[in-house]
Image (cartoon, grey):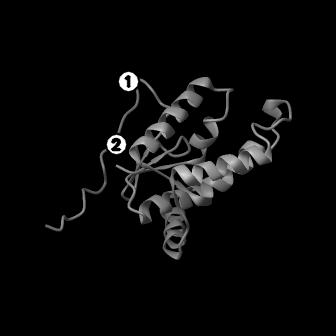
Amino acid sequence: MASLVDTNVLVYRHDPRERSKQLRATELLEAGIGSDSICIAHQSILEFVSVVSRPSRALADRSLMSLGEALLEAESLMRQFTVLFPSPDVLHTAIRGTMLYGLPWFDAQIWAMAEVNGLEEILSEDFQHGRHYGRVRVVNPFLRGPGVQELPALYGPGPRAD
């Protein structure tokens, strides 16, 4: 199953403030490289560079990475993962996602990227865990424990061409 990784997973990989999330993000991305099962949206690479290179109060006005380091990591991500780029279909679907599901614009674009490209899930902590938006299920990879409940799919698998 192919998954779309949201920006927060990419950022946590380099953020030592939450060690458990850093380890989980690293584990997910390494497994995705090994199985070729993870895609990244163009938008997430742009957001990653912005977030990790911007000074933060939580880091005493330092950034997680210098701009140069962030750009090198962006190039590395582009070599290691399939990068999906927006198309008119993605933008039209994002507009519908914003209206139908009430998603914020940038989240709607991430969802639309998965929906249009036939990906089955988004790995993100920014959506409602276990919810299906169209044919795409959201999984918060940082949740652990017995309290996590999955919701059933709204749509079954599509018709098979035999």
Q: Residue furthest right?
A: 61
Q: Which mark is residue 58?
A: none
Is 108 situated left or right of 155 in this image? right
Q: Residue at x 80, y 31 (%)?
A: 59
Image quarter for residue 26?
Answer: top right
Is 44 situated left or right of 53 in this image? left
Q: Are marks 1 and 2 in contact (CB under 8 Å)?
A: no
Is 15 situated left or right of 21 in this image? right
Residues packed near mark 2 inside 10 Å, few (<14), some (14 to 19) or many (20 plus)? few
Q: Which mark is residue 146?
A: 1
Is 111 situated left or right of 135 in this image? right
Q: Could you give the CA–CA distance between mark 1 and mark 2, rounded to whole angstroms?
A: 14 Å
57 or 87: nearer the eye? 87
116 shown above or below 16: below
54 shown above or below 83: above
Instruction: Residue type at mark 2: give it.
Output: Leu
Residue 93 image offset from top left, x and y in percent:
48, 69
63 or 130: nearer the eye? 63
Q: Which mark is residue 151?
A: 2
Q: Residue at x 84, y 35 (%)?
A: 62
Which quarter of the rendered picture does the C terminus lie within? bottom left
> What secondary structure is found at the residue carrying circle 1?
loop
Residue 156 image offset from top left, x and y in percent:
25, 56
Residue 159 image offset from top left, x and y in percent:
20, 65
